[in-house]
Structures are given as C-alpha cells and as structure tokens.
Image: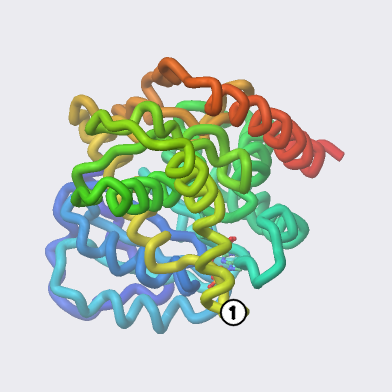
Amino acid sequence: ASSHPQMEEVPLLMGSNCRAKGAAPGFKVAILGAAGGIGQPLALLMKMNPLVSVLHLYDVVNAPGVTADISHMNTGAVVRGFLGQPQLENALTGMDLVIIPAGVPRKPGMTRDDLFNINAGIVRTLCEGIAKCCPKAIVNVISNPVNSTVPIAAEVFKKAGTYDPKRLLGVTTLDVVRANTFVGEVLGLDPREVNVPVIGGHAGVTILPLLSQVNPACSFTSEEVNYLTSRIQNGGTEVVEAKAGAGSATLSMAYAAAKFADACLRGLRGDAGIVECSYVTELPFFASKVRLGRSGVEEILPLGPLNEFERAGLEKAKKELAQSIQKGVSFINK
Ligand code: NAI
C-alpha cells in the first residue's frame, strides 16, 4: 500500500482549506469515466471501501460535481476530481489500482462489438496515460467490448514497455454475479451461497458458465442448463432492452466492479486464497478462475473437468474470442 499520500494541491481537490491530517494508509484508486452510469455508483462504493485511502475521479464531463458530492461522505478515503485530458496525468500519478468504465454503452439492437469504434480509442488514450504515470498499477478494464479492449490495453502497454500480464484484468464479474443470482433462483438458494465459475469472455457465446462446477454441488436438467446458459449469456441484453435506449447495466455493474476491485485490493494487501474469475492474458486472452495476490494475478487456475455441453461451448467461445482479440491487436498495430 502507498503510505505517503500526496497532499499537493491538485485541481478540484475538495476540502483543501481544512486542517486535513491526510489519508490513512491504504490504497490509491482511480476511476476513469467516473461521472458515467457505472462510474458514479462505483465511486460511491469505492468511497465506502476501508482499503481505499485516496480516490481519484476522472471524466471528460461532470467530474467536479460527482467529486463534490462523493467527498461529503464521512468515510476514510480522500476524494479528488479531475476533468478532461489535461488532468489525466495528475489523476493517474501514484495510483495502485485503476478502474476503467469510460466509454459508450449499448442501446437496444447493438452488440458489444458495435461499441468498438468509439471505445477502442478511449481505452487506448487512457492506457497510454497509465503506462506513463502509474505503470505498476493493477488495471481493471470494464469498457466494452472487453474481449477486444483488454487486448488493446495489452498492446498499448507492450509498446510502452510496461506490459505485465499479472496486472491487466478484464472485469467479467457481472457474468458471475448474474450466474450466481439466476442459479440461486433455480435452486431456491440464497445467491450469496452460490458460486458459479464463468469462463471464456464477456460477450454472447463467449460467456461460458460452468454449471457442472457450481458450488454447492448440484445437478440440473438439460432444460435448466439451456435456460440458465442462455439467461447468463444474455443478461446484459435483458437490461439493455428493459432500459429501452437509456443505456446498459450500471448499478449491478458498479456492484460487480466494486466487488472485483475489493478482491484485487485484498490480494495487493497479501490476503490468502482470493479467487475470482477475470479476463486475463492466456490463450492469449481468456476469462478464467485466477488467484489474486500482491502482484495481481498470481496463478491461473485450471478449468477443471468440463462436460460435453461445456466443451462444445468452449470451442464456440474460442472461435469468436480469437476474432475479437485480433480486432483489438490490429487496432493498435495498424
Ligand atoms: P455512460 O455513458 O453512462 O458513462 C461513460 C462515461 O465515460 C461518461 O461519463 C463519459 O463522459 C465518460 N467518458 C467518455 N470518454 C471518456 C474519456 N476519453 N475519458 C474518460 N471518460 C470518458 O456509460 P456506462 O453505462 O457507465 O458504461 C460504460 C462502459 O462500461 C460501456 O462501454 C459499457 O458497455 C461498459 N459495460 C461493461 C460491463 C462489463 O461487464 N464489463 C457491463 C456494463 C457496461
């Protein structure tokens, strides 16, 4: 953890006129896209996380308002806001964890891949800033299409010479959160007691819930397997359609992102046995169960035994993933 909080005057620093003692020891976290539908509730949840000592909120619009608002919460983290590209470097300097929910969300009828043209450039610019200002930070990529934006981030970091596969993680936690909820409903269990590994990627058929590995152990009829697999794969679209043009999942996503960020921070702190699913650099990119630790991803856990349905799903997922990865890689190297 960074134990020397920076107390220099930075733009939009809130509460700079009081006799602040400075932040308690803890981690420094930046949210890029903090004024958005995901960014705002995520900022709220990270301000409530006792492991966070400094919270930087960056966006190209509305960062001062969100920062003023969040900064009034009487929790430990010191909050600072940063508005627009000229303040990106200040927002990133010294950060331990950077969470990226910047970019446009889907509207009904769109796939995540339809967002590529806009979000690819946004993720590139933000990652160039990370490579320059906090190359050792853990990076959590939320911006869609995750299957391509994580490879984009990797290529930017490779070009800058700062690439560390242990520190770059695509956030697929919402798929796991949804899977736990829907499986809990079918089994009549408290969703907090259910754990469904979800592997592959974060779009359509690349989202592969391993229903044969649900904890607590259980079995499903083939009807239940089809229903659950389809509902988990299309959970995002369910929300996009219900919001009818007003965006995609933001609240459940902020919850999932805060949960995943907390796991990353506990890993950084040195807690043992932190296992989450995440889209990481393997095969060359693949969502797997990973063990988190002081350096980020310390171990990629084996997939475990798959049944025939899951093996067939895996083949489909890999085919689509290969294209999405290639699209991200060529965006940077064209
Ligand atoms: P939003 O449009 O409400 O917010 C996006 C924010 O990003 C806005 O405040 C905007 O000003 C900001 N932004 C745009 N360009 C920027 C730049 N260059 N630098 C910094 N900030 C910038 O969108 P929402 O609903 O918050 O979604 C954000 C992203 O998260 C979308 O790409 C969406 O597809 C993705 N998403 C990912 C999920 C996942 O499971 N990984 C689930 C749900 C959404």
Percent coordinates x, y for residue 124 in the rendering: 67, 50
Is 178 located above or below residue 80 in the figure?
above
Q: Amino acid at mark 1?
A: Ala
Q: Quadrant of residue 154?
A: top right
Q: Residue at x 33, y 63 (%)?
A: 8
Is 324 located above or below residue 213 in the figure?
below
Residue 170 in view here = yes
**Which quarter holds ligand 1?**
bottom right
Give the labeled residue for mark 1: 244
Secondary structure of residue under mark 1: loop
Q: Residue at x 53, y 65 (%)?
A: 238
Percent coordinates x, y for residue 288 in the rendering: 46, 29
Give whichever of 64, 331 is nearer the camera. 331
Percent coordinates x, y for residue 334 in the rendering: 87, 40
Q: Quadrant of residue 312?
A: top right
Percent coordinates x, y for residue 213 in the rendering: 36, 27
Is 34 located above or below residue 225 in the figure?
below
Q: Residue at x 40, y 83 (%)?
A: 65
Left or right of 314, for residue 264: left
Q: Residue at x 42, y 51 (%)?
A: 174
Give whichever of 163, 267 is nearer the camera. 267
Tell me the quadrant of the picture where the N terminus can be found: top left
Q: Quadrant of residue 116?
A: bottom right
Residue 133 in view here = no
